[in-house]
Image (cartoon, helix red, strand yellow):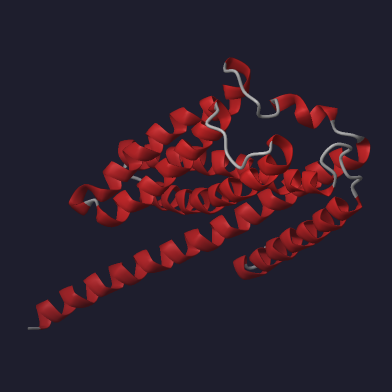
Amino acid sequence: MPAPKSTRFLAACAAAFALLLLACLAIGAAPPEATMGVVQKIFYFHVPSAWLLMLSALVSAGGSLAYLFRGSERGDRVALAAAELGVLFGLCVLVSGPLWAKAAWGAYWQWEARLTSSLLLWLMMVAYLLARRYGGPAARRLAAALALFAAVDIPLVYFSVRFFRSIHPQTTVVSTLGPGMRGAFWLSLAAFTGLWFVLLSVRLAAEKAQAEIVELEILLEQAEEEKS
């Protein structure tokens, strides 16, 4: 007999929490980097957050495509939930990145390709949410178009350090990590990704419940009109 959804969800939450705990322990045990010292450990939070910003934008674009071309309400809910997570994890990127940059470069911010394209991606996720809220009757379609536009920026964020002159670390930095650092990084990436999926599930459930409440209210109004 399959487990109830609530049981599966609690199991997923427990697994995500366990991964986060293990990741924190692994990060604490990871050796400090020779040049930056303990400040380099921001890397274990910054890079997974950047990955989830891009994943959120990609999932939001996929849900928006389903809504625009198939009229999928679920796709629209996925797009909204993913965009909200994109704003959340993008904010983590924009906070942790400058803290790391100050130690590495001596400045909190540089207008170089990777940083600028990441900021642009986050701003487009914010624009998506603003369009959903204030876009009027065509709010959802306008927001969906913004999500597709944001997805175009994802390759630029990832490949910018290869195609443009940049002081940002290359995408190959993970492969150069020492054994203690590499395990901590992959565990942190898995923990953050698991947390992302849990948060997405919670937000989708909330959106679905809200849609069902709206449908019930409409049905109740129709029933009252028929009685009168």
Left or right: 3 in relation to 220: right
Report x, y in % for residue 152.
Answer: 44, 28
Q: Is residue 137 above or below residue 141?
A: below
Looking at the rendering, in which quadrant would you find the C terminus? Answer: bottom left
Q: Residue furthest top?
A: 163
Question: Horizontal placement of 128 versus 7: left or right?
Answer: left
Where in the figure is residue 79, as x and y percent of width and height?
Answer: 43, 47
Q: Position of residue 125 (x, y in %)?
A: 43, 45
Q: Is residue 143 visible?
A: yes
Residue under the image location 75 percent in, 46 percent down: 44
Q: Nearer the viewer, residue 36 or 93?
A: 36
Question: How many discs appear?
Answer: 0
Nearer to us in this view, 3 or 93: 93
> Residue at (57%, 50%) from the top-left corner?
89
Residue in view at x 90 percent, y 34 percent: 178
**Quarter of the image containing the N terminus?**
bottom right
Q: Is residue 75 left or right of residue 68?
A: right
Q: Residue 176 vs residue 13: left or right?
A: right
Residue at left 80%, top 61%? 21
| Residue 47 visible in the displayed image | no
Q: Give the quarter of the image for residue 65.
A: top left
Where in the figure is residue 28, as x and y percent of width and height?
A: 87, 55
Which of 104/161 is in front? 104
